[in-house]
Amino acid sequence: MRAIAAILTCALLFGCADFSRFHPESKPLAIKKPSPKFAIDTKWWTIFKDDQLDSLIEEALANSPDIKIAQARIRLARNEAGIADAQRYPQLNIDGSAVRERMSATGYFPPPLGGSTLNFGQLALDFDYDFDWWGKNRAALNAALSEASAKEAESIETRLILGTAIAQSYFMLQSNLAKLDISKHILQEQESLLRLAKFRASNGIESDYRVSQEESNVAKSRLDVSRIEEAVKLGRTQIAALLGKAQESGNAIEPRIDPPPQIPASIPADLIGMRPDIMAQRYRIEAATNQVVVAKAEFYPNIDLQAYAGVQSIGFGNLLKSGSEITSFGPAIHLPIFNAGMLKSNLGAKYAEYDIAVEGYNRMVIDAMRDVSQASTSLQSVITQISAQNELMKGLEKAHKIAFSRYREGLGDALSVIETETPLLSQRNIKTDLDEMRMETILQMIKSLGGAPMPGGSTRSNPG
């Protein structure tokens, strides 16, 4: 007991450490807790109500090497946390040895023991327990748990990146498929105008200039069709690559025309606090905080309770005989006194790592706020443009209907019908571009929020 008291006295006398000159220099930005009516959906793609897109994303997530790597990192982090957790409990082991050794004839033991070759045997039950009075092991466990949580959040971020990449390629492909259909229709109209111009020129009603002009328009339309056909093939190939499948698998994607999803009219900026990358960085701040605790605990005495009980003998046959018993019990202390500033440098490094984690978090928060603001502004802008485009197309559709009605009643000619339909088709191409832009902007909104904001409160229908 006196030995234990002496060790504790040494701990109190020499275990005092001055941390006054060490402190964090960074402070994380405060984010309000999101309203309960908003939630992040890990299956955000379902808001597009497109079963074909659902299948593509789910297949990619199931087979992606990046996702499997992220899952393996989670398992690694969890097992490392298990290792840290084991340090908090008593350790009990059985150790044994069997050694044949020649004793020195001029050493500690005189002949006949000296100079002989003997068998040494030992079998003991070893016990070791770290009291962890300064919370070092607990802090190490908390740091490991925070790292595991960070890996889980990063896995969600990896899923989000892959899913939005597939959705973006998918919507671009759907836009190109729609534009290809329109461009083929425009080509047919241009070819009809060319035939009509040639017929009128052969009868002296039209000049050769008009024929040349229509030939140029046909050539341009064919070029447009070829260019869009190439874009469609590349889009199918890109999606197949994201799925990790052969190029031909992208050919199974069919054209779809689905209405855009509804997005809440007002998105609170503090919803970004649920973004997986920001959550991962917040967990890393927690891990860095606990690593500071571990570094501080290194300044204090480390006190273990050690014991063993077993048997030991010279000659294996005597190992289990009476009198071979060995026992030991008592505390052990490790007390740092002089280490050339190593512990202080280590503590300073841990505070620096904390500051790095905090500033990385602050940068993410600022960037996320910017991304949400830009996506929201762009979405409202494209919705306004689509509304104006719809009004423009209404006028062109009305003119085309009038020309077609006059032609059907014998009051107009086919030229007027074709000439009013061609600009309408061109404007439909522009409308298709705007629809694609709207989908891309919605994806940017989803990505900037870390997932789709589920409708819960006022929503505004998207026109067109």
Image: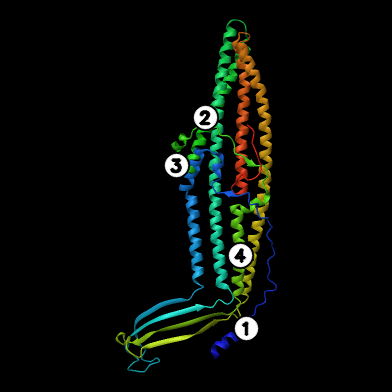
The answer to whether any part of residue 223 appears in the image is no
Tag 3–tag 4 contact (CB < 8 Å): no
Q: Badge 2: few (under 14), some or many (20 or more) residues near its Cα, within 10 Å? A: some
Labelled disc at residue 288: 4
Q: Element under label 1?
A: helix
- Residue found at x 57% / y 73%: 136
**In the image, is residue 212 above or below residue 167?**
above
Q: Which of marks 1 and 4 is nearer the N terminus?
A: 1
Tag 3–tag 2 contact (CB < 8 Å): no
**Place of residue 131 in the rendered image (x, y in percent of width and height, measured from the top left):** 54, 78
Residue nearest the viewer, comparing 99 with 32: 32
Q: Element under label 3?
A: loop
Amino acid type, mark 1: Leu
* Image quadrant in which you'd find residue 294: bottom right
Q: Mark 2 points at which residue?
A: 229
Q: Badge 1: few (under 14), some or many (20 or more) residues near its Cα, within 10 Å? A: few
**Place of residue 197 in the rendered image (x, y in percent of width and height, measured from the top left):** 59, 11
Amino acid type, mark 3: Lys
Labelled disc at residue 245: 3
The Cα–Cα distance between marks 2 and 4, rounded to whole angstroms, is: 53 Å
Labelled disc at residue 12: 1
The Cα–Cα distance between marks 3 and 4, rounded to whole angstroms, is: 41 Å
